[in-house]
């Protein structure tokens, strides 16, 4: 399986995402924001960072990059797309996902290991998790507070489109403790925490077994690979 990782000016976690993809067992394909070619990939990751310096709004300018025309078209045709942190912001700005992300309620950047509950394990990116699995992966954001209208929130909750919810405390003021959402089809997922930083023992969050041994993020990437294999 070939999974593309799009690099924008200001991306920080594109190489981390590519490494996570390789550790999960797929080929990582580097894509550039100015391209109009997805090079035949089977899935896409929009990585974290500060695309275009987060000017205007986080993810707003990146959502209008040339390659996003291809990303939007592919997503609407069913290609799996994962937006992580800044990538989540891009997906909401591109209207591929409902809601939006604003400044953290305490007005400061947050960086910590964060507990999550997987609320939807039927999406293309969460199928390898058990129902209601509780995991820990890193969180690092300044504009990670998920907001939506009452009507949108009701739809997201009622249709089971909350992918992950914060547990152990809400770090940024997100409504309903929402850490990630999916579209109705389940192929497009936005996640504020960073699964790509919890894929390799020795470099992840601390666990009861050992320091830096947490690899809870790897299942996001193995999920999309498993789904592709079933489809074939």
Image (spheres, rainbow, N blue to C red):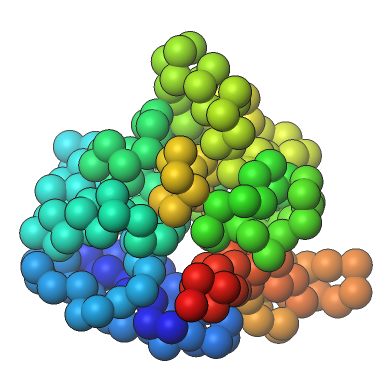
Q: Is residue 84 above or below residue 157?
A: below
Q: How many marks?
A: 0
- Nearest to the observer: residue 80 or residue 22: 80
- State the residue lying farthest toward the right: 208
Nearest the camera: 108 or 72? 72
Give the residue at x 36% y 74%.
42
Residue at point 66%, 51% (across, down): 121
Q: Position of residue 116 (x, y in %)?
A: 70, 47
- Side of 159 where 12 appears, left or right: left
Camera sees residue 68: no
Residue at 57 percent of width and 73 percent of height: 230
Residue 76 placement (x, y as % from top left): 28, 49
- Which residue of the protein is positioned furthest toward the front in this rendering? 232
Quarter holding the N terminus?
bottom left
Q: Nearer the viewer, residue 67 or 140?
A: 67
Picture quadrant of residue 113: bottom right
The single residue placed furthest to the top in the displayed view is: 150
Describe residue 146's horizontal placement relative to residue 64 as left or right.
Answer: right
Residue 5 occupies quadrant: bottom left
What residue is at 25 percent from the left and 59 percent from the top? 74
Between 160 and 95, the residue placed more toward the observer is: 160
Q: Is residue 174 visible?
A: yes
Left or right: 182 as drawn, with respect to 87:
right
Q: From the top left corner, tell me how far across and down residue 6 is, in percent.
A: 27, 69
């Amino acid at each position: 399986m070939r999974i593309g990782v799009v690099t924008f000016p200001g991306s920080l976690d594109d190489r981390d995402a590519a490494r996570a993809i390789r550790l999960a067992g797929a080929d990582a394909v580097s894509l550039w924001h100015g391209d109009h070619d997805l090079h035949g990939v089977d899935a896409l990751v929009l990585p974290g960072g500060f695309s275009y310096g987060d000017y205007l709004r986080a993810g707003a300018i990146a959502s209008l990059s040339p390659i996003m025309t291809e990303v939007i078209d592919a997503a609407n045709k069913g290609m799996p797309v994962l937006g992580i942190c800044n990538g989540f912001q891009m997906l909401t700005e591109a209207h591929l996902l409902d809601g939006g992300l604003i400044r953290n309620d305490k007005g400061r950047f947050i960086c910590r290991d964060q507990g999550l509950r997987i609320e939807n394990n039927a999406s293309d990116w969460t199928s390898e998790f058990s129902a209601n699995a509780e995991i820990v992966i890193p969180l690092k954001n300044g504009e990670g507070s998920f907001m939506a209208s009452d009507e949108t929130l009701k739809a997201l909750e009622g249709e089971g489109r909350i992918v992950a919810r914060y547990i152990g405390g809400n770090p940024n003021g997100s409504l309903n403790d929402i850490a990630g959402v999916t579209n109705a089809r389940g192929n497009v997922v936005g996640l504020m925490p960073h699964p790509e930083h919890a894929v390799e023992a020795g470099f992840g969050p601390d666990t009861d077994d050992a320091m830096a041994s947490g690899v809870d993020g790897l299942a996001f990437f193995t999920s999309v690979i498993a789904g592709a294999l079933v489809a074939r």
